[in-house]
Amino acid sequence: MRRLALAFVFALLAGSPRPASAEENTRRWCAAELPSLPNEVCYFVPEKPAPGPRTLIIHLHGVVQPDTNDQWNSQRNAARVGATYGHTVMMPRGKRGIGPKTMESWWAWPTSMDARRAHEDALVAEWTAARAELEKAAGKPFERVYVFGFSNGAYYATSLAMRNRLDAAGYALFAGGSGASYHEMEAKGTKRRAPIVVAWGAGDPSHDKQKALAKMLKRMRWPHLEIGRPRAGHVMTDEQVEKALAFLNGR
């Protein structure tokens, strides 16, 4: 059984994030070792792709405070998933001005209806164009696409899945996502139901929302897997990633 070299800790760590140095602030959004496509879409291509269907993971980051190194940590951990499992990973960037309360100016995803109306079409167009560029460079298309979301990215990915907004083969939600009634309303008109993994840790103050999401999916008979861990916090662990991919690949 394969294990990641390090546990994935996409966490809201105690204390303030380390400010970037003046030199780092002059650098791009993507980590130095990761190439980028237009609209600051970072990506990773494994040296040895896994056998079987060519797979693309679209990784949606959590809220990212400007002028810190948080996005690089997120990108490097996402790239490590790609390296471990032999999948290409695309890491797009959210928008500013739409973040949660007290984080409005941070990089985030459009979880509210107003923000979706303002930004979603452009975001999806960016992802579609980036995917096309990667396929053109490889000379072949991706046969399946998974969406991974962490924290704020998982809340947004929940909405994408409920509405079948993307042509995705499955979703993995880590430390985020909720069973809010409006998600169930969104799903009523959705005929294609891509499988969803809901991963949470009992040490995360918001894990009840993820448990509620799993209950909602069960009630709706939506194909899903719940991975709750009593000792985990607001993180994305190597075990959760492993089990999520095993579940999605087996569908």
Image (cartoon, rainbow, N blue to C red):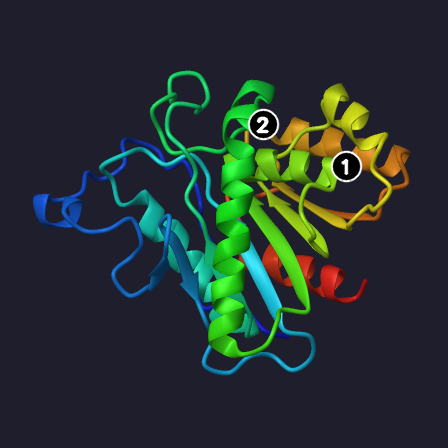
- Calculate the distance from the C-alpha at mark 1 to the C-alpha at mark 2: 14 Å
Amino acid type assigned to the residue bearing label 1 in the image: Ala
- Residue 44 spot, x, y in % from top left: 43, 66
**Quick one: which residue is furthest to the top in this view?**
101
Q: Give the camera-side residue of 100 and 19.
A: 100
**Quick one: which residue is furthest to the left in this view?**
22
Which class describes the residues within 10 Å of circle 1: few (<14), some (14-19), or many (20+)?
many
On the image, numbered disc 2 is attached to which residue? Answer: 206
In what element is the residue under mark 2? loop
| On screen, residue 111 above or below 247 | above
On the image, numbered disc 1 is attached to which residue? Answer: 214
In the image, is 73 to the left or to the right of 200?
left
Q: Give the camera-side residue of 219 and 12.
A: 219
Where the C terminus falls, by quadrant? bottom right
Task: Name the residue: 69% across, 75% down.
Answer: 53
| On screen, residue 30 above or below 250 | above
- Residue 122 spot, x, y in % from top left: 50, 38
Task: Name the residue: 74% across, 42% down.
Answer: 164
Q: Which mark is residue 123?
A: none
Where the N terminus falls, by quadrant? bottom right
Amino acid type assigned to the residue bearing label 2 in the image: Ser
* Contact flag, marks 1 and 2 (Cβ < 8 Å): no
- Residue 132 spot, x, y in % from top left: 53, 63
Residue 208 visible in rendering? yes
Which class describes the residues within 10 Å of circle 2: few (<14), some (14-19), or many (20+)?
some
Sequence-wise first label, 1 or 2: 2
In the image, is 240 to the left or to the right of 189?
left
| On screen, residue 133 above or below 161 | below
Q: Give the camera-side residue of 220 and 90.
A: 90
In what element is the residue under mark 1? helix
